[in-house]
Image (spheres, grey):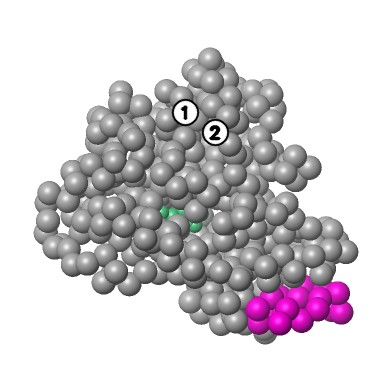
Amino acid sequence: VLPPIEYLDFAWRWYTHVRYDLASSGIAGAEPELLGEVRPDDLGSRQRFVDALGRRYGVTDDEVVPAMGTSGGLYVIYATLLERGDRVLCEAPSYEPLWRVAAANGAEIDHFSRRFEHAHHIDVDEVLAALRPKTRAVAITNPHNPTGCVLSDAELRQLAEALAARGVSLVVDEAYLELARPCSTARKLGPNVIACASATKCWGVSWARAGWVFLPPELKLAATRVERYVNGLSPPVSWAYGERAVDSADRLLARAHELQATKREMVDRFVASASDVLSWVPPHASSVFGFVRDRRGEDLLPKIEKGITELGVLVAPGCFFGEPSAFRLGWTTKAPDVNEGLTRLARALGLGEAIEPHR
Ligand SMILES: Cc1ncc(COP(=O)(O)O)c(C=O)c1O
């Protein structure tokens, strides 16, 4: 029996049930009509989706495997790569499925730290020191979930090269990359890089479940086989919408930036006004979330739960990312709700008079 993915259980328990949602990390959903009509039985859509991804990211056909969201992509990657007893070295703090799905596919998990003191960047020497003889892959997110830190291509290339020299793959979950750097993928930065992403987070097309894996051509056959095992025939409608989403990506990003306007300033003010208690490494300018630490050092879960049940405000507790005295704060809901949500969050966290009204 698979163990729970505790963060997702928490998220599904509360998602859409709390008035002020400062937990969600994806751009508000785009209406399907924005992408035009598609046929659910369009069997040609899979190849057209692959072609569209090739045009946007400059990857070749034999590097692409469509997947059911980034979630499905992670499953495909680990089921393709791992043998029982292999080890996966995963970043911390971490998006729980990044290591849970590896564990479910037989891996032993180790962690390395993306330290606050290093602005959550990766110390390659620390990663190399944490490799073990059976380490098959290092797994990261870029942008980093939960902190919104973005690694440069130079940093990623250096890490990929160091791992390639040791026969280790670099798995990069790029679910949030289009908001930071449109049209790019770490797959281009080294032969041992495997990347996954989807139309969900940056383009607001979560409902299509249109995701992808970019991998070395020699892994494509095995990865495609995973899809056969899990889905048989994946829904053509996902790929049909996926093709439209990729081809409409610039328009969807413009929509995303319009929806996000003014909200970051509110959040910056919130964190600054409670700076005696709260601190963060400011996430990249287009990020829709950041990871806020509480200097008091306590496990914030009870306060966060009180915020949910008594004050109607939801944030993602840091305990699910491996840091109990922090929380991931998102600003994808409507601007007035972000504003009111922050006021309520201040109350839930007992920040009292530290916080000024954010009007
Ligand atoms: C880092 C990361 N990867 C993947 C996912 C899942 O996204 P998708 O809808 O593409 O499956 C999420 C969702 O929260 C995420 O934060």
Q: Which of 172 and 312 is in front in this view?
A: 172
Number of other residues with Cα within 10 Å of mark 2, as a class: few under 14, some 14 to 19, many 20 or more: some
Q: Distance between the residues labelled 1 and 2?
A: 7 Å
Is residue 104 highlighted in magenta?
Answer: no
Q: Position of residue 185 (x, y in %)?
A: 44, 38
- Label 2's element? helix
Quadrant of residue 285 within the rendered picture: bottom right
Q: In the image, what residue occupies the spot 76% across and 81% down?
A: 357
Label annotation for residue 189 = 1
**147 on left or right of 355:** left
Residue behind label 1 places its C-beta within 8 angstroms of ligand 1: no
Horizontally, residue 10 falls left or right of residue 303, namely left
Q: Residue at the spot x=38%, y=61% of the render?
A: 252
Dominant secondary structure of the residues highlighted in magenta in the image? helix
Type of the residue with mark 1: Leu
Q: Horizontal placement of 261 versus 70: left or right?
A: right
Q: Can residue 316 be seen in this view?
A: no
> Closest to the observer: 64 or 34?
34
- Amino acid of disc 2: Asp
Asked whether the residues under the numbered discs 1 and 2 touch, taking CB atoms below 8 Å apart as contact, a structural biologist would say: yes
Dot 1 falls on a residue whose secondary structure is: helix
Boundaries of the magenta span: 339-359
Mark 1 or mark 2, which has the lower sequence index? 2
Disc on res. 153? 2
136, above or below 114, in the image: above
Q: Position of residue 193 (x, y in %)?
A: 45, 29
Residue 36 higher or lower than 155, as above or below = below
Q: Please state if 342 lies on the left or on the right of 22 as rendered.
A: right
Q: Quadrant of the C terminus?
A: bottom right
x, y percentage for residue 110? 61, 34
Badge 1 crowding class, 10 Å Cα cut-off, few under 14, some 14 to 19, many 20 or more, is some
Report the residue at 46% width, 25% height from top: 190
